Amino acid sequence: MGQIKHAFERRIITIPLERILPTHKLDKDVQSSKKYSTILSSIRELGVIEPLAVHPQPVVTDGVASFILLDGHLRLAALKALGGKEALCLISTDDEGFTYNRQINRLTPVQEHKMIMAAVKKGIEPALIAKVLGIHVDRVRERQHLLDGIAPEVVDMLKVRMVGREVFRILKKMKPFRQFETVELMTSANCFTQNYARMVLAATRPEMLVEAKKKGSNEANAEDIARMEREMEKLYHDYKSVEDTLGETMLVLVVAKGYIARVLRNDAIAGYLYRYHADLLEELVSIMEAVSSDARHLERE
């Protein structure tokens, strides 16, 4: 199989606004919208948090290269309204706008934390940050301290993951090495829910916790913990075994799905199945949709 093509170049560059070409015009009433006002206030007070996504224009005019804007039209309009001259941009290797939204999520909790901390270091008060972001000031303070007690290696592992804040609270109850083990398990299972984190916490030995568990009637004993650890280890090995063959299996399923789709495009066959085996036809269509959905999910991963 060929090498995976990166959706973006690794570097972020600064581009003059006049060299960025929008792909569509904004509605006339967009400047009166709440979303635009929030973006305008955010850029005015905090600067551009998320770079614009652009693609190099194939044709160079007068020796100067231009860039097609794929994502960030409101940010571009706000920058121009504030008298900005340039913008930080991500360079896309594909000129299709949907690629950006497919490959890049919005701010993750770790990225949001770093953005807030950068604003605080500039001397911006939490109350002003809360006003700009449209949230309560208590939530800003909570996000300021999101990573307190989290091991740096764990922060690095979670920086591009959409993880609920409750997961960080659970991780803080563990010592650094156990935090690392927990996030490795979550990554292997591709499951970053608070329920999964609580399950790992319940199976954690007392010496791996920041504070010892309080004794109670529902406390798991050593035998229960050992059994849960064996089951989780078995689950991890089963997952890795499936992961090793996932690409090949998915390829076979996609080929089979394409063949069945061609068969069902035959009106005679489709009509026969509809009249005499409607339940089978419904099941085939359902399986084909599931294969398509799984294939798209695998591509995003």
Image: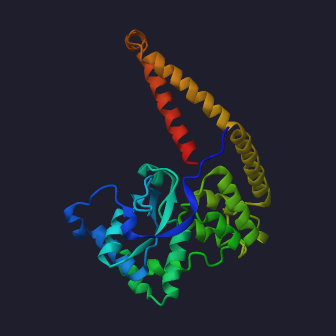
Image position of 145 with respect to 179: above or below = below
Which residue is painted at 66% across and 72% down in the image?
173
Quadrant housing residue 221: bottom right
Quadrant housing residue 239: top right
Which residue is painted at 46% across and 79% down in the image?
140
Image position of 158 with respect to 79: above or below = above
Q: In the displayed structure, does residue 158 sit left or right of residue 290?
A: right
Along the viewing direction, whichever of 231 and 69 lies nearer the viewer: 69
> In the image, residue 233 lies at what x, y percent?
76, 50
> In the image, residue 290 lies at what x, y percent?
50, 34
Instruction: Name, please, the residue furthest toward the left.
Output: 28
> In the image, residue 187 lies at what x, y percent?
66, 55
Quadrant housing residue 60: bottom left
**Is residue 135 in sight in this rendering?**
no
Q: How many marks?
A: 0
Instruction: Name, please, the residue furthest toward the bottom.
Output: 123
> In the image, residue 301 lies at what x, y percent?
58, 48
Along the viewing direction, whichever of 101 and 64 lies nearer the viewer: 64
How is the protein colored in the picture?
A: rainbow
**Is residue 131 in sight in this rendering?**
yes
Q: Quadrant of the N terminus?
A: top right
Q: In the displayed structure, does residue 156 sit left or right of residue 9?
A: right
Which residue is painted at 74% across and 40% down in the image?
241
Along the viewing direction, whichever of 81 and 256 lies nearer the viewer: 81
Which residue is painted at 38% across and 14% down in the image?
274
Q: In the displayed structure, does residue 251 sit left or right of residue 185?
A: left
Along the viewing direction, whichever of 245 and 76 lies nearer the viewer: 76
